[in-house]
Amino acid sequence: LALLSVGMFVAGFGFKMGLVPFHQWLPDTYEGAPPTITTLLAAGTKKAGFAATIRIVVLGMVVLNLDWTLALGVIAVMTMTIGNIAAIMQKNLARMLAYSSIAHAGYILIGLAVSPYSSLGLQGSLYHILNHAVMKGMAFIAVTGIITTLAVTHIDKLKGLGRRMPITALGLVISLFALAGVPPLAGFWSKLMLFGGALDAGSTIWWAPWLAIAGVLNSALSLAYYGWITRKMYFEGETEKRVSEPKSIIAIMIFSIVFLVGFGVYPDPIIKFVEFAAPTFSLGIMP
């Protein structure tokens, strides 16, 4: 009965987080919803699923003496890989970002899979949840500005965006490369902590380092479609006149850029915060 209960919790929270094979709703929702609602979904509500998973599923396995860590690791690899491969094939910007979010759910799950064996795992998951809220929120705010100003979402229509909407384009590029884990942006450090946790857990479980390898390979794969968008915005299209960008979008872009660059160059405050926060989730069970 306990095993069945945990399995049902995993399925329910897997749907909430967009984990494979419970991810099918996410691309259609992100593409079809108003961009402001999509921003809220991407930056906020999905993260609640991870908090609940940490509290109920991961710690519940420890309390009930159920070892589902390998299963979580397999789901993490499947989620990362399927999310990134599907993202490469998308032509709609919002839909591509949706599949990117699925991939990042896989990265976060790496930390949860190894959390009973390494304190870095849970810390890395919390760190990446925070970073992803800013990175993906910033990306969808940029999408909101593009739709509001130019009424386009097709990636081919982004040609020359770097000249037409320079601040929005810059914010989008920084968010994309932060999502890929490119230094010196904040996303680099949370991924480093996640993959470091997997390597650290390798002293106890043989399969954990393979999660780190899969994460690094998937991060490299994500650069293919992030770089494709960047090329469209800056290196393709004819020179067009600059358009007026919404001031609210500019303000959010500037704040997010400062966050991602600032905490990429100096990550210590966030690292100390997640080190402090992790025990409140682990309740002293994690090493």
Image (cartoon, rainbow, N blue to C red):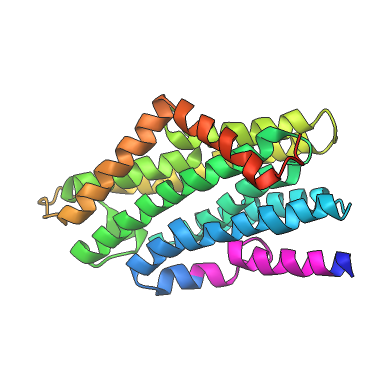
State the residue at coordinates (20%, 45%).
166
Q: Is residue 5 above or below residue 223?
A: below
Where residue 145 sits in the image (x, y, percent)? 24, 59
Residue 17 is one of the magenta-drawn residues: yes
Left or right: 280 in relation to 160: right
Which image quadrant: the N terminus?
bottom right
Left or right: 92 in relation to 2: left
In the foreground, 39 or 175: 39
Where residue 50 sits in the image (x, y, percent)? 61, 55
State the residue at coordinates (55%, 38%).
220
Residue 121 is one of the magenta-drawn residues: no
Count every numbered label the image shows and give the total.
Answer: 0
Q: Is residue 74 above or below residue 146?
A: above
State the residue at coordinates (82%, 38%).
207
Q: Is residue 13 above or below residue 221?
A: below
Where residue 203 sits in the image (x, y, percent)? 83, 28
Where residue 210 sits in the image (x, y, percent)? 75, 37
Magenta span: 5-27
Q: Is residue 17 visible from the viewing direction of this image?
A: yes
Magenta stretch, overall SS: helix
Q: Is residue 170 visible from the viewing direction of this image?
A: no
In the foreground, 154 or 170: 170
Which image quadrant: the C terminus?
top right
State the residue at coordinates (59%, 56%).
83
